[in-house]
Amino acid sequence: MGPADRATLERALERILPGRDETLLLRAILHRGDEAREAWEDFQGRLPDLPSLFRTDTGNRKRLSPLLLESIRENGLDADAPLRTVIKTATLREQLRSDIYRRIGGDVFDALGRRGFEFVVIRGAALAETAYAAPFLRHAHDIDVVLMPERIRDAAAVVRELGFADAPPLDRAQGVDLRHGTELPVLLLSRLHRLPFYRGHLGDGGLRTRRVEGPGTGAMTVLDPVDALVHALGHASYSPTRSNLLWAVDAWMLIHGTPALEWSAVPARARDMRVELPLSVLLGYLARDLGAPVPPPILTELGAAHEGSGADGGLRRDVALFGARQSGGAHPELSGRPPLTPAQRLTLLRWELWPSRAYVSWVYDDPPAALLPLLYLVRPFSAALERIRWRLARLRNRWFRRPPVESPSG
């Protein structure tokens, strides 16, 4: 990949990063002392109606309310009475919700454990117990459990015995979605990542895990800090829910909560999961914009991913770009980014309409070679339909303040 293409790819992948206002909010929440106060003052000056932001948005900022309230108290941030009322109310709700969430999760983990299932708890359900000072500080929308693929059906039967009902099937053969009476989803997954290109299966023997105290009566298995960090950032690279900024807080908590984090293992784990390209962008943001203590040699090693990754370099590039497009215009600050140059726009259009052959084969489940020319011919039409869908989603979000929608297409 030449310097021009590398610069274009880096700019395109910036789509997954928070904007300036979001970065100021993160710094006000995560930092302490003068740095937090300065960021908060700047943030307040840019957004005049903060009570409305934390009260009426799609839920993204309300989820940060407990963390913001903690920072207000510890750093003496200037917050007027209406904002404090909104933040305190949201925090109380998170505390009550967390108690119910942890009780339901504990019941599921205990039931699976008693039946002898081997499983790993990931994302919010695991991080709330291990990376945060208190579980209610980490909002989680669902409970994610990774099992051996051949054991998911039996595990689902056990969870149904607890009163859970089946929800619509997950796409891309991820696993089973079961719903508690409170509508809380429990996802029994066959792999760490929603995109099957990114690796992470319980049965491949490569996951680094540890046993910790769970919310139920026994211990549970979670990812160790290195794999948890790589997974959190990898997931954020393709999920539209990254606009809630929890991925950045998760990464910060993992880094600062693990003083002896084995940084030297991060590039290798990223390569094993095949997420080194987006990981280099996200870790770079954490170090550059948030001031996370990421060792520069690690960033240099991961940055080499932009030069290509062997024979499947085009595939990795195209999958990373697919993930960056998953925001569908729902991210609140995408429109404020500096515009791409005409040459960069043409390059991105070329990559979108004529991606690598390996990527087309991946998207369409290894079609016969004779069909590949036809699939390339329909790419412009599928891309146009995708853009129309994103524009409609953006309008719907603006008018009805709904959460982002993930595009199922490639």
Image: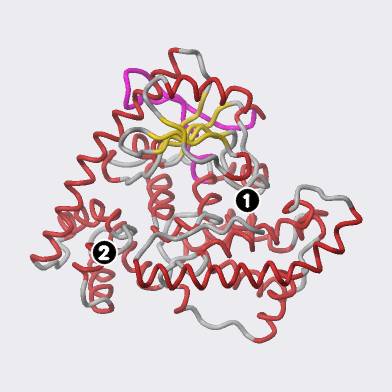
Identify the residue under disc 1.
Answer: 275
Quadrant where the N terminus is found in the figure: bottom right
**Residue drawn at point x = 32 percent, y = 22 percent:** 216
Q: Which residues are magenta?
A: 205-229
Q: Residue at x 57, y 45 (%)?
A: 194
Amino acid on which the number 2 mark rests in the picture: Ala
Label 2 crowding class (10 Å Cα cut-off): few <14, some 14-19, many 20+?
Answer: many
Q: Nearer the viewer, residue 72 or 382?
A: 382
Residue 145 x/y as whole percent: 48, 32
Locate residue 120 relative to residue 205 in the image: left or right. left
Q: 184 or 265: nearer the eye?
A: 184
In this view of the protein, which residue sits in the foreground, 297 or 359? 359
Asked if residue 118 is positioned above or below residue 341 in the image, the reply reads above
| Residue 337, horizontal then vertical, whole percent | 48, 78
Question: Of tags 2 and 1, which is closer to the observer?
Answer: 1
- Can you identify the residue that label 2 sits on? 36
- Name of the residue lying farthest toward the right: 370
Query: Percent position (x, y) of residue 282?
Result: 52, 59
Residue ID at (56%, 24%):
153
Marks counted in the figure total: 2
Residue 318's place in the image compared with 89, above or below, is below
SS at mark 1?
loop
Label 1 is placed on what type of residue? Val
Q: Quadrant of the C terminus?
A: bottom right
